Image (cartoon, rainbow, N blue to C red):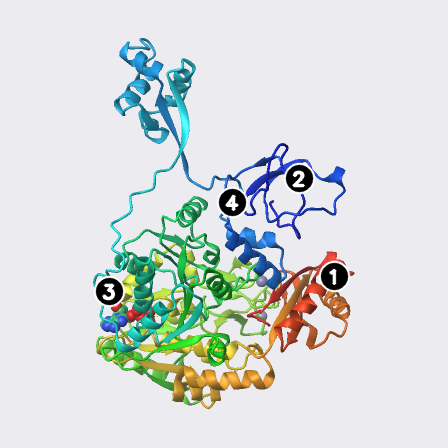
Amino acid sequence: VDRPLPAPLDYLPPAGHVGAIAAGSRVQVPFGRQQLIGMVVGHAATSSLAADKLKPITSLLDTEPLLDAGLIELLDRAADYYHHPLAELIDAALPRRLREGAPVEALEEYLQLTAAGVAAVAAGEPRRAQRQRAVLTALHAAGGDLPVTELAAQGAGWRAAATQLARHGWLQSHWRTLAPVANPETAAGSVPLAPPPSPAQALAIEAIDAAHGRFDCFVLQGLPGSGKTEVYLRCAAAALARGGAVLVLVPEIGLTPQLVGRFRDRLAVPIAVLHSGLSDAERLTAWREARSGRARIVIGTRSAVFAPVQNMQLLIVDEEHDSSFKQQEGGCPYSARDLAVWRAQQQNAPVVLGSATPSLETLHNADLEKYRLLQLPRREDQAPPPTLALIDLRTQAMRAGLSGAVLQGIERHLGTDGQVLVYLNRRGYAPTFLCTSCGWIAPCGQCDARLTVHQNAGQLRCHYCGHEQALPACCPRCGFAVKPVGQGTERVAETLRELFPQHPLVRLDRDVARSGADVDAVFQAVLSGAARILVGTQMLTKGHHFPGVTLVVVLNADQGLFSTDFRAAERLAQTIVQVAGRAGRAARPGEVLIQTDYPDHPLLQQLLAGGYAAFAASALAEREAASWPPFSKLALLRASSRAPHAALDFLQAARTAAGAPDAVRILGPVAATMARRAGRYHAQLLLESTGRGALHRLLDQWRPLLGELPGARNVRFGLDVDPLDTQ
Ligand code: ADP
Ligand code: ZN
Ligand code: ZN
């Protein structure tokens, strides 16, 4: 239905239907006064509804189930684990067109001459109707059978003519499964242009390949450029050679044409690509390619974990630490990375979690020997690792957010044909718009946030609720001058353009991507060397290597150092390592400059001295001492309301309803770090337990009570199991 139901509904089989309808099949059912499409998820011998209230299914849409038993089981298990309605997961798993009733297989309408039609053509019929005659002749010329898509080339009016001809009994229409596009020659096993694997790559490939036919989870750790993708390609080739298919999950913005191109070039099999930028029709086509078994490799973002891949023998999750694998904006907040591990278990297939900076959860599983850690050290033909240095901002003269040391570094690298990458996790021109006279700061009327200055667009924008307004010319309070304060990517790009006018600069962030600019062209400009300076956000840290970049600058490392979010340090370390890893691929080693006010901060010191491994070890020790994940399990109940206190009151009632559960700590309720967003007040209640069992036993009893609590109707609430963000 159009909105997910909290629980499945009971219906009788359609009148006259014999036998059970397979779970995973779509049906049309009466729902109130409407007829809606639903999915059969199971059979029951009895119903809690009275016999006279039970309605029969109107009709069956599928002759075989859309989702196979394995996928239904996976969705069921996920619904259970995340304590979310199964319908929400089915929603995530199915392309919209299928939810609306599109057939499982692509069908195409054909027109076919009948025997009478053949005779009519021979007799020169029909003598007067030009159009009808043209259609008949076209059909005859094509051997008596044509898809309507080709007849449509005859120009308008062919349909009316065909209807007349059908009335005479000269032709008939029928639907056929769309002929699959011819497969390219399958060169399974043979890998053109593949570099010979390094010893470490060979060991990894061997270990993963030896796990074929059974479940095993591997963590493939190696810096960007160490050859993880090479390992994926080799292992995928081996799985294909055995007749299997491969599912590859990548982060939202890591899915680049280059990555897909590497799979295409090296593995000559049909590939289906699934990501959020597809149209409904494209998504349906890609899903069908997977479902029919035609696509042997499916590459996709988060929801592709539900792709109906046939005979899946290998799963790969690239950049497994990436937060885009966790659904965070509505719907069931599942982790595609975690579900991929379940799916591999279910399929008896190995799964590879690849990253330069594995999440602490994953490293912990490797420590426990649940996962097997495979490491790719730097290859001999690779550039030496970049040198990292901290720039102490307290001792530096600053120019528009850029320290003297950084500006000198940029000049030096540009002067010796290097490329420079400047990373700043803040888009827009400036984060604050300030009145120099009365101290007024442009606020968002709907959020507890300041408005960000977007100079190019001449706007102030809220990055939380999307509110936009024109840049005021003067202070609305006192009429004095207002000015942007602080740095965003737009401003840093402007400053660098002024300082280094002879060196072409490109910028990349969500605003650039949204403005319709060709993101791929930006990357190409950097890869070709045409652009010498690249300024951007997080978007730079994914998927792309820039061999010509010799200097990486991290402008505002400090944001992650003092956050109240226990994951902030992990994210900062990951970002620094990932962005540093984009540099110095070729013969020239890279240099990384990190601007900070806290050069003595232990996190930065560890990262510099011992790299990500040293950081991770001490971060894990800290998490253990504080009993944070992965040493405990969390669930977060979030609520929001229009009235300032309704969300907190509701959460207080929820806390009371939980009683004093065994082995689960309940923290809160508290207002969210940014309490007011888009005019709603946000608050949360955190549940923490050292054992998954105790937490889920509580959630099983507690979740169903929430909707009945006083005030439940005045709030929006959602339960997030294993939340990434606990702010
Ligand atoms: P990652 O996925 O870890 O970032 P890639 O697999 O993309 O690394 O490898 C980075 C570059 O190094 C690619 O151009 C790749 O072809 C090359 N490469 C990988 N492994 C080898 C190898 N064993 N010998 C030579 N070149 C290699
Ligand atoms: Zn003012
Ligand atoms: Zn806002």
Front: mark 3 or 2: 2
| Residue holding disc 1 | 705
Residue 552: quadrant of the picture: bottom left
Quick check: 624 left or right of 582? right
Q: Are marks 4 and 2 in contact (CB under 8 Å)?
A: no
The C terminus lies in quadrant: bottom right
Q: Are marks 1 and 4 in contact (CB under 8 Å)?
A: no
Q: Are marks 4 and 3 in contact (CB under 8 Å)?
A: no
* Crowd band around label 1 with a 10 angstrom C-alpha radius: few (<14), some (14–19), many (20+): few
Q: Is residue 457 above or below residue 684?
A: above
Mark 4 vs mark 2: which is more N-terminal? Answer: 2
* Crowd band around label 3 with a 10 angstrom C-alpha radius: few (<14), some (14–19), many (20+): few
Q: Is residue 619 above or below residue 20?
A: below
Q: Closest to the observer: 29 or 720? A: 29
Mark 3 vs mark 2: which is more N-terminal? Answer: 2
Front: mark 3 or 1: 1
Quick check: 619 left or right of 36? left
Task: Name the amino acid, label 1.
Answer: Leu
Mark 3 vs mark 1: which is more N-terminal? Answer: 3
Mark 1 vs mark 4: which is more N-terminal? Answer: 4
The N terminus lies in quadrant: top right
Q: Residue furthest front?
A: 19
Front: mark 1 or 4: 4
Task: Name the amino acid, label 3.
Answer: Ser
Task: Name the amino acid, label 4.
Answer: Pro
Q: In this rendering, does residue 699 appear at all?
A: yes
| Residue holding disc 3 | 528
Question: At which x and y percent is residue 11?
Answer: 66, 41
